[in-house]
Amino acid sequence: MSTINTISSSPYDPNKFIDRDEEVRQILTILKQITPRVRAVVIEGDRGGGKTWLSLHLHRTIFKQEIKGITSWLFSLWSPGENYHPEGKEAQVGECFLREGEQSQFKVDDFLKIIINSLQIELPPNPTMAEKVDSIRRYVQSHTDDRFVLILDSVFESDWSLIEQVETHFLGNLLTLNNFFVIVTGRGRPYPWKVPNLIEAVRFGLGPFSVDNIKKQIEKFGLSSFLSVDEIYGIGSGWPVFTEHLARVKSQWEALEAAADILFAVLPSYERAAVREYFEALSPLDGFGESEAALMVKIYKKSEKEDGRAICRKMNETRLASWKNGRYEMNQPVQKILRQYLPIKNKQAWVDLQKAAYCHFKSQAADRSMERFRPFFETLAKNHAKVLSEAGIDTLQACPERQTEEALS
């Protein structure tokens, strides 16, 4: 049974929150300014960096303890899996957490309703959207000594048509006020803002935890781990989402299986298994295009033919891979975990993929039409030859005649 189906992540608890002091300090500094020049903050980070917990920590704890006269709202616009409920049993006042399948149903009116209800604003009969926004604006304007903060969590992964509506009808209006602020978090390709305040936002990323912070996490969660702290760090690369799960497992294999399950819990359940195969197949490569996607998935699935363009598009949509340096690249946590996981799960498949990659790049290096890229392809082929050699595979026998061409046909 898949580990992620039996272990649910713990909900946010201020007593279990670790680090992020510098990020919190920067945000509080902005909010405490009398005439703030910047009124928007964008927090970026890979899957499992703790963006949602930081959002909850700001909304439920920091803004209540560290600064007076602040009203905040938290909208988490995308769900990282059916077993992840960081809000606890239910959301609190001024919060909204969308689950799988709810994103397309959530409208700007739903968004405004939560804000208006929390402020106890009285509206005229049958108000228009403009009247609702204006009522919020007038309320904020009339409380000049207070601060109002809208936290939009998981924006880049969410339904961009909703974000466009929120930006057009709400953010562009409210961000002209000196006491209204927006904090945005997201993973993957950034949303292309049009409002100047969001274009000029302060930006910072959430990096992985240190070994010491992982140790603190385990202690604060009250766990007694089978794996050492260094082993947990080695598998999860310091990303906090993994620590609790990896501290509960009873073997290295179970840890890798749990880590892989956590990564792909972000995908809709109906397509999770199929898309996961794409990532497993392409994990041996540092980067890939459509031809590599078609080849590697075909080898892995032992199928007749695969659509490289469709594979790349689907992987890009997950925000677990993105276009960088002229090719698609997986997020580092995803690639590192799958490179540990797949050779144990199916060593022969791992060897077959390494062979296919070696032969493909060797063929590319020999292609005269791509002569100027020859050193690049030679380096890639050499890297895969090294992996094969370490596995006891003779590269002279790795490429039967026309293997690569047939795989791509």
Image (tube, rainbow, N blue to C red):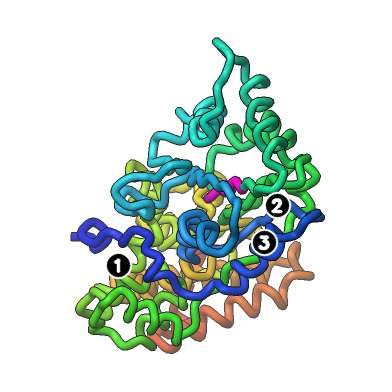
- Which of label 2 and label 3 is nearer to you? 2
Q: Earlier in the sequence, mark 2 or mark 3?
A: 2
Snapshot quadrant of residue 364: bottom right
On the image, the x and y values in percent for residue 407 come to 48, 57
Label 1, label 2: how many angstroms apart (C-alpha)?
36 Å
- Residue at image position (74%, 54%) is 201
Label 3, label 1: how many angstroms apart (C-alpha)?
28 Å
Image position of 227 with respect to 149: above or below: below
Image position of 88 with respect to 129: above or below: below
Mark on residue 258?
1
Dominant SS type (magenta): strand
- Residue at image position (74%, 70%) is 373
Amino acid type at circle 1 is Ala
On the image, the x and y values in percent for residue 163 come to 61, 37
Residue of label 3 = 324
| Label 1 environment density (alpha carbons within 10 Å; few <14, some 14–19, many ≥20) | many
Is 227 left, or right, of 377 in this rendering? left
- Element type at mark 1: helix
On the image, the x and y values in percent for residue 36 come to 78, 55
Image position of 323 with respect to 211: above or below: above
- Which of label 1 and label 2 is nearer to you? 2
Is 60 left, or right, of 382 in this rendering? left
- Element type at mark 3: strand
Are the residues flagged by discs 1 and 2 in contact, CB closer than 8 Å?
no
Are the residues flagged by discs 2 and 3 in contact, CB closer than 8 Å?
no
Amino acid type at circle 2 is Ala
Q: Is residue 186 visible?
A: yes
Mark on residue 40?
2
Position of the N terminus by quadrant:
bottom left
Residue extent of the magenta highlight: 149-156
Amino acid type at circle 3 is Lys
